[in-house]
Image (cartoon, rainbow, N blue to C red):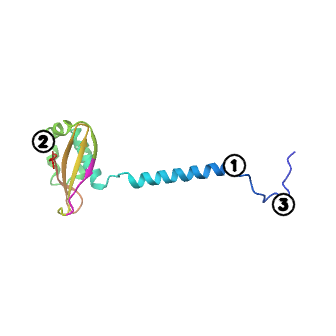
Amino acid sequence: MKQLPSPGQANAPRPAGRSKVLLPLVLGVVVAVSAFNVFSHRENRYERLASDVTRAIAANDMRPVEKEFNAIRRPQLEDRAKVGALSDFVNAEGKLKNVKEQTPPDAKSGTHRFVATFEKGQRAEDLAVDADGKIVDFHVTPLEAK
C-alpha cells in the first residue's frame, strides 16, 4: 500500500536530477535558435518577389506571378517568344540558389536591384514597382564585373 506523505514531507525539496541537466540543454537550444535567427538572411518582400518571378521565368510559365504585374504590363507576359528567350537566358546559369537585394541608397523610389545567384553564375535583376506595389518593369541582365 502507498503511504501518503506526512504534512512535513509535502514541501520537502525534490532531488535535483533531471532539472540540472534539462535546464542548460533548453537554454542552449534557445540561444542557438536565437543566434540563427539574428545571423541568418531572410528574404525581404522584394527579394521574395524577384525570386518568384525568376523561378517563373526559368519555368517558362508566368502564370504563377502574373497578378504581381501591373495590369498595363501583364499582356507582355503572354509573349511566348520573349518569355522563352528570357527563360533560356536564365536557365543557362543553372538552378536558382538565391536572390539578394543590392539597391543603392540613392535609388529612385520603387526601384530595386538584385543579384540572382545560380549554380553556374550570377545575373543582375532590376525590379520597378508602382504605388500599389505591382511590377511595372523586371529586367534580367548579365552581372557587370566591378
Q: CA distance from mark 2 to mark 3?
A: 84 Å
Q: Secondary structure at mark 1?
A: loop
Identified at 22% across, 51% down, the residue is: 114
Q: CA distance from mark 1 to mark 3?
A: 22 Å
Q: Which residues lie in the magenta part?
A: 99-105
Residue 41 in picture, x, y percent from top left: 35, 52
Q: Earlier in the sequence, mark 1 or mark 2?
A: 1
Residue 123 in picture, x, y percent from top left: 19, 44
Q: Amino acid at mark 1?
A: Gly
Left or right for 15, reference 79: right
Q: Nearer the viewer, mark 1 or mark 3?
A: 1
Residue 99 in picture, x, y percent from top left: 27, 48
Marks 1,2: beta carbons within 8 A: no
Image quadrant in which the N terminus is located = top right
Label 2 packing within 10 angstroms: few (<14), some (14-19), many (20+): few
- Residue underneath mark 1: 17
**The one of 138 and 39 positioned closer to us in this rendering:** 39
- Residue underneath mark 2: 82
Label 1 packing within 10 angstroms: few (<14), some (14-19), many (20+): few
**The one of 85 and 100 positioned closer to us in this rendering:** 100
For residue 129, what is the image quadrant?
bottom left
Q: CA distance from mark 1 to mark 2?
A: 68 Å
For residue 14, what is the image quadrant?
bottom right
Q: Secondary structure at mark 2?
A: helix
- Residue underneath mark 3: 8
